C-alpha cells in the first residue's frame, strides 16, 4: 500500500484522523448554513416596485434608502427612512425621518415640496406584514390591507 506502507496500525490512525477532520468540517458547515438561514434579515437587499416608481435599498443597519422616480416633472428623490423587523411575526415597521425629508427637499432646490415628498412617503410610513416568494417581496399594510409588490434587483 502507498499510505503507511503495510503497517495496519498507521493506516488505522490516519483513517481516524481523516474521519474526525471531515466530521468536524461537516458540522461547522451545517452550523454556519443553519445560522445564516434562521438569523439573517430576509428583507435586506435592493427592491424595485412593479411599476418602477419606487426603489428600496434595505440595509442591515435598520435604514432604508427610498428612491422615488418622477416625484415632480422629471425629478427623482432619495430619502432615508428607518425600519424594524420582527422575523417571527414577519412584520416590518417603516418610519419617516423628518430630518432626512428636510435634507431631500433642500437638495431638490424647489423641484418639489415637502408635501409632495410626504404624500409619497405616507404610504410607506406604516407597519406591514411581509412575504418573500423567490425574488418578490410583498408588503401588506396591517391596518387597511393595501399591498405593495417589489422585485429583487
Image (cartoon, rainbow, N blue to C red):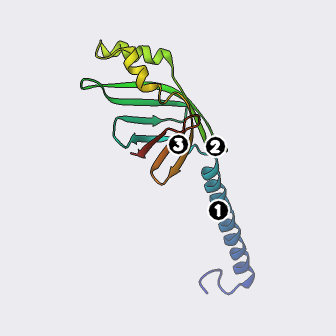
For this view, does 115 lie left or right of residue 15?
Answer: left
Disc 2 or disc 1, which is closer to the eye? 2
- Which residue is identified by label 3? 43
Circles 2 and 1, Cβ within 8 Å, touching? The answer is: no
Q: Of the numbered discs in the image, which one, if any, rests on residue 83?
A: none
Picture coordinates of residue 18, whole percent (x, y): 66, 71
Q: Is residue 72 above or below residue 110?
A: below
Sooner in the amino-acid sequence: mark 2 or mark 3: 3
For this view, does 112 lie left or right of residue 65?
Answer: left
Residue nearest the viewer, comparing 19 with 128: 128
Q: Of the numbered discs in the image, which one, if any, rests on residue 25?
A: 1
- Which residue is identified by label 2? 87
Q: Is residue 111 above or below residue 76?
A: above
Picture coordinates of residue 21, whole percent (x, y): 67, 66
The answer to which image quadrant residue 108 occupies is top left
Give the residue drawn at x 59%, y 83%.
2
* Residue sitting at the far right: 9
Picture coordinates of residue 59, whole percent (x, y): 50, 35
Image quadrant for the N terminus?
bottom right
Sooner in the amino-acid sequence: mark 3 or mark 1: 1
Q: Secondary structure at mark 1?
A: helix
Picture coordinates of residue 110, whole percent (x, y): 29, 12
Q: Secondary structure at mark 3?
A: loop
Residue nearest the viewer, comparing 64 with 110: 110
Circles 3 and 1, Cβ within 8 Å, touching? The answer is: no
Q: Secondary structure at mark 2?
A: loop
- Rounded to the nearest angstrom, the CA distance separating label 2 from label 1 is 29 Å
Circles 2 and 3, Cβ within 8 Å, touching? The answer is: no
Image quadrant for the C terminus?
top left
Q: Is residue 126 above or below residue 4?
A: above
For this view, does 12 lie left or right of residue 77?
Answer: right
Give the residue drawn at x 38%, y 25%.
78
Amino acid at each position: 500500500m502507498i499510505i503507511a506502507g503495510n503497517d495496519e496500525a498507521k493506516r488505522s490512525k490516519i483513517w481516524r484522523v481523516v474521519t474526525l477532520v471531515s466530521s468536524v468540517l461537516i458540522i461547522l458547515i451545517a452550523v454556519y448554513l443553519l445560522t445564516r438561514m434562521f438569523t439573517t434579515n430576509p428583507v435586506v437587499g435592493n427592491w424595485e416596485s412593479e411599476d418602477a416608481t419606487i426603489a428600496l435599498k434595505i440595509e442591515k443597519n435598520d435604514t432604508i434608502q427610498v428612491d422615488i422616480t418622477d416625484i415632480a416633472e422629471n425629478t427623482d428623490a432619495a430619502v432615508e427612512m428607518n425600519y424594524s423587523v420582527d422575523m417571527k411575526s414577519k412584520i416590518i415597521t417603516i418610519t419617516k425621518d423628518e430630518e432626512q425629508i428636510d435634507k431631500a427637499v433642500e437638495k431638490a432646490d424647489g423641484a418639489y415640496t415637502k408635501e409632495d415628498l410626504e404624500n409619497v412617503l405616507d404610504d410607506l410610513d406604516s407597519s406591514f406584514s411581509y412575504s418573500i416568494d423567490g425574488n418578490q417581496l410583498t408588503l401588506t399594510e396591517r391596518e387597511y390591507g393595501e399591498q405593495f409588490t417589489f422585485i429583487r434587483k
